[in-house]
Image: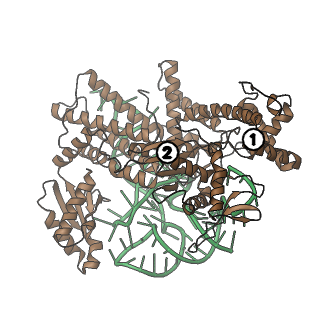
Chain colours: A brown, B green
Amino acid sequence: MSLLSDLSDVFGDAFASIGLDRSFGEVSVSQRPDLGQFQCNGALPAAKPAGRNPREIAQEVLEAVSGDERIAEMSLAGPGFINVILTDEFLAEALQTVAEDGRLGVPRAAEALAVVVDYGGPNVAKEMHVGHLRPAIIGESIKRILLFEGHRVAGDVHLGDWGTPMGQLIVELSERQPGLPYFDAGFTGPYPADSPVSVGDLQLMYPVASERSKQDRAFAEAARQATVELQDGRPGYRALWSHFRTVSIEAMRDVYDDLGVHFDLWNGESTVHDRIQPMIDRLVEAGLTRLSDGATVIDVADEVDTKEIPPLLLAKSDGAYLYGTSDLATIEERIEDLDARLMVYIVDVRQSLHFEQVFRAARLTGIAGPDVVLEHAGNGTVNGPDGKPFKTRDGNLLRLADLVSMVVERATQRLDENELATGYPQEERHRIAHLVGMSALKFGDLHNHRTSNYIFDVDRFTSFDGKTGPYLLYGAVRIKSILREASERGLKGGRIIAADRDGERNLMLRLARLPEVFARAVEHRAPNQLAEYAFELVADFNRFYEACHILSEPDAARQGSWLTLVGTTLRQLELVLDLLGIEIPERM
RNA sequence: GCCCGCGUAGCUCAGGGGAUAGAGCAACUGCCUCCUAAGCAGUAGGUCGCAGGUUCGAUUCCUGCCGCGGGCGCCA
């Protein structure tokens, strides 16, 4: 399988052979490359329970392993570290296996699960802003990671399309355009096919209506009433709402398309509306709820809790549902309709208490059985250069569409400054600028840990130097260029042979590490692990490129080996960047 | 008040119980008759917030404190 698991087996056997637990044989990549490629520290934790000296144990393990043809050198160091260096022949064989593997060494999950990744969460009629950036980028990556692991994954944008704001907009519009048939209770239809409002109109109306609800009690009451009627199915309101939803989705899709973020499901709170009342009735009948100040709640606190967990509100005292209610019903819907076994929510970490409540409620009510995993993989925020939440000069949240065009404009400037992609057709140049911009944006975001807040800095992200998206794209394009040139000269990749210099050996060692990195990314839902790997891979390739002049190499076998190595590097880079949602241009 | 997260190089950030804590930027020194120099090689830069504890070993796990941010039933 992977180099690390193979080596762990070897050392596990050795520990077993001297009567110690084989789990002590775990091998990791060396932290001291000057002393070895890999290390096994098992003798240290093994010493205490065995009541023995760790160096003595390490010495016996070392002797038990010695003679293994795959290992070129071993040494005992410090209090009981075992350093390992592989033979170049074995390393070459291992890489040959990676090169021949369609999955580049990464195993599939033992069991393919139906998974829903819930990310996005924009609201109908409301402009998308910076706050929607991280869930979109991280969610897209986590979806791709789980998909590659072999699961059946559906990404759900999960719109906010069913709450009080919908009623507010209906009332607001009824005042602005009272003559529309949607407001005429006696109208028998059919309603116009075209929306009476554009998404721009909605986005202007939204804050106005929202503000009025706070100031004007009559308006708020009318909005509440409209919301109830909408949810009860009043035809005119439903028809109008449907227009709101449609024009909003069109606008969202434009932004998401620019970001390369794609959803399988455009569901929302409204999707589960019909399930909510029956669900509540059932829970009430089962005695799982209670009334609290007129509201229907479900207690989710547990005696062993160290913190106070308030009950989840299923229905307000006026009978209206809350978002926790639809979240609970959505869990039920996904299990029943999609047979979902894992749901991952990529939502701001600040919502963690809410998810804790919803997940507990799902458990307590039996909606989610023990075979269903519910997970809130929270994300941090995007901050401005001052370290505070990103705002525009006038104090508003930056529109996501503006952020995207800002990055693409800066990327275009960078191309100009560096006289790159000059002489290309205008259309290709635009495309390259877009891809460079997106790589900058996404890598700038994803190389941070999922839960950290980070400072957004266009200049730094779009820089052509250092740890940036453009650096990765450059590396990938350079590799493509070499392979194109090789192909034109009729050169072909051959079997990988033993490395004879560091630049080559280090690239091989890097390429063998993907399985562990991928496993870690899956386990922690941590795309930054893959982002870091992509950077290290390109950096190792650049060193290899410096040390090994591929196209002029006179030894045909070595040149063939190098070409396979270059090809494998490109395939891994394409895979990893694709898992991050980053697309590579053909040239730049 | 209770709970959650963060505090690592001048800046932006990684870091999986292990040895000498890393990267990028910024600073400084080198390398283009050679596959894209958007690159490579090197130098310098640290009480890992503070104090305890667990451990053979703690930046990592636990407790307390300080600082910053966030959350805490009828919004989402």
Residue A444 image offset from top left, x and y in percent: 52, 44
Residue A120: % across, % down:
59, 43
Residue in the image at 63% along x and 59% along y: A283
In x, y percent, where is residue A376? 54, 55
Pointer 2: what residue?
Answer: A338
Residue at (86% x, 49% y) in the render: A215
Q: Chain of mark 1?
A: A
* Residue lying farthest to the left in this orientation: A67
Marked residue nearer the N-terminal end (2 or 1): 1
Numbered-mark total: 2
At 63% from the left and 38% from the top, the residue drawn is A400
Q: Amino acid at mark 2?
A: Leu
- Asked if residue A578 is positioned above or below residue A163 in the image, the reply reads above
Write down the chain letter for disc 2.
A
Disc 2 from disc 1: Cα separation: 27 Å
Say which quarter of the image contains residue A308.
bottom right
Secondary element under disc 1, as helix, strand or loop, is helix
Quadrant that contains the C terminus of chain A: top left
Can the viewer see residue A240? yes
Outermost residue toward the front?
A285
Residue placed most toward the observer, A70 or B65: A70
- Left or right: residue A523 versus residue A2 is right
Q: Which kind of residue does numbered mark 1 sit on?
A: Leu
* Label 2 close to label 1 by CB (< 8 Å): no
Q: Is residue A445 visible?
A: no
SS under mark 2: helix
Q: Is residue A245 left or right of residue A104?
A: right
The image shows residue B48, relative to residue A503, as above or below, that is: below
Q: Residue A230, which numbered label?
A: 1
The 10 Å Cα crowd at callout 1, few under 14, some 14 to 19, many 20 or more, is many
